[in-house]
Amino acid sequence: MYSQHAHPALATALTLVLTGTSLIGLPTPADGAPLTYHSQKLGRSCTRWIKEPRTQTCRIYSPSMRTTLTVDLQLPLRPTAPILHVFGGMWQHEHQGMLMPHVGGLAHALSSTDVGFVAPVAPTNGSMWTDWRNPTLISDKKPIKWETFFTQELPNYLWRTFGIPPRPRNAIALGVSMGGAGGASMMYRHPEVYRAGYFLSGFYNFTSPLGRTALGVISGLSGNTGHDMWAYDDYAAHSPTELADRTSLFHTRFVASTGVLDLSNGEINHKVGDNLLRLYGGTWLEAGMSVSLSQFRMVVKKKDPQALRDGKAAFVIYPTGVHFWNLWRRDMYDEGGLQDILRRSGVRYVPIANPAQLQDPFARSTTPKAKDTPTSVEKPNPAA
């Protein structure tokens, strides 16, 4: 089905897997990097979280971006265990919302698993987690090179700081909202790095008029334009829709909702500001994500039907839910989405309760009722 001429990256990924070689350009034991590993090691310029002692916040210098990044990470219990690359949405602050106990709850959810995670805080809104060609209007005018960071600098840092060896196809992409789009693009572009991906409320066609408009809006939040992010021809090279024939290389789960507000499912709370945001922004935005996901599924069915037949790609669209954490927590915890993608990636995971039920005294139960059954689900094949 795949040819080296059509997709050189695929041939590279398969070569790495078959030969067991290190990722190109990354250090090897001959470089004098540490060979011992301790999962509880505290890195230099890192501070440990008090309530989640496996999680630490580190200050990591990025040569490509010429700046020091704030990165939350959890070391895997074994140096060869998978590591989640967490791609957050816009409006990040001190930490990605995906990790926080009142929001995504991921730091606690993974605290008893074998896997690690890495979750940088992007200093710029609207980064799309990609390499920019010319971010001219950023106040400090420093480069934005997230693709370089995740695929080259991060493995180097983990190896030299903690003794985690670079291994082909040992990362799992996890993205939400903007990070769902950017994380999916990262995964499809680097099959030599990723084995799986879990994407919540992203969009996947960067070359359509709607996709280009969305990317222009996202990049504009940092004072730039879509042209500052990529050249015209680069949109296709980054679009998951254009790369959909690679889908069967990964275990994936794509999630969205219709954008219909569910008044009984905790989506209206005691905070008036949150309610207005969800009613105005979360409804139409999530409706657009569900359309994008439906169209992307059709593209995958056409370009890589084996991914659907083998159950390696799961597409879930809920009849209710807006573009907010209630929806994403519902799939991650109540519907077992996090357990699903980790299990299919070879990771043992002990499910936890929805963090909202444990942390927020005002939250109503988000346990799905009969009408909340997804309208479109491909059940993963356990043997895949």
Image (cartoon, helix red, strand yellow):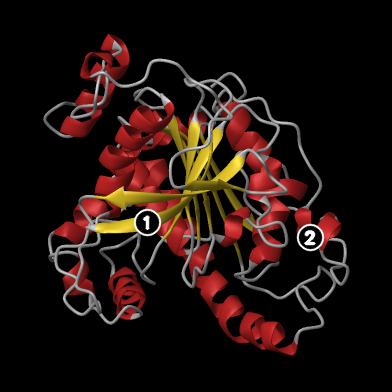
Disc 1/disc 2 C-alpha distance (Å)? 29 Å
**Which secondary structure, mark 2?**
helix
Q: Residue 253, percent across and down?
A: 54, 43
Q: Residue 251, percent across and down?
A: 49, 33
Task: Work out whether residue 353 or residue 320 is closer to the camera in this orientation and state it.
Answer: 353
> Image quadrant of residue 130?
bottom left
Instruction: Name the residue rendered at 78%, 52% in the picture.
Output: 354
Instruction: Name the residue rendered at 33%, 44% in the picture.
Output: 150
Label 2 environment density (alpha carbons within 10 Å; few <14, some 14–19, many ≥20):
many
Label 1 environment density (alpha carbons within 10 Å; few <14, some 14–19, many ≥20):
some
Q: Is residue 380 visible?
A: no
Residue 322, above or below 5: below
Q: Is residue 144 visible?
A: yes
Q: Amino acid at mark 1?
A: Leu
**Which secondary structure, mark 1?**
strand
Q: Which mark is residue 331?
A: none
Instruction: Name the residue rendered at 40%, 44% in the picture.
Output: 300
Residue 46, above or below 20: below
Task: Work out whether residue 325 or residue 49 is closer to the camera in this orientation and state it.
Answer: 49
The disc, 1 or 2, on the residue closer to the chain's N-terminal end is: 1
Q: Amino acid at mark 2?
A: Ala
For the N terminus, give its image quadrant. top left
Q: Could you tell whether 269 is left or right of 255 in the image? A: right
The residue that label 1 is drawn on is 69
Q: Could you tell whether 124 is left or right of 2 in the image? A: right
Task: Work out whether residue 11 or residue 58 is closer to the camera in this orientation and state it.
Answer: 58
Q: Residue 99, percent across and down?
A: 61, 53
The residue that label 2 is drawn on is 356
Q: Could you tell whether 258 is left or right of 151 in the image? A: right
Judged from this view, the residue extending furthest toward the front is 44
Determine whether label 1 and label 2 are within 8 Å by CB: no
Q: Residue 39, percent across and down?
A: 56, 26
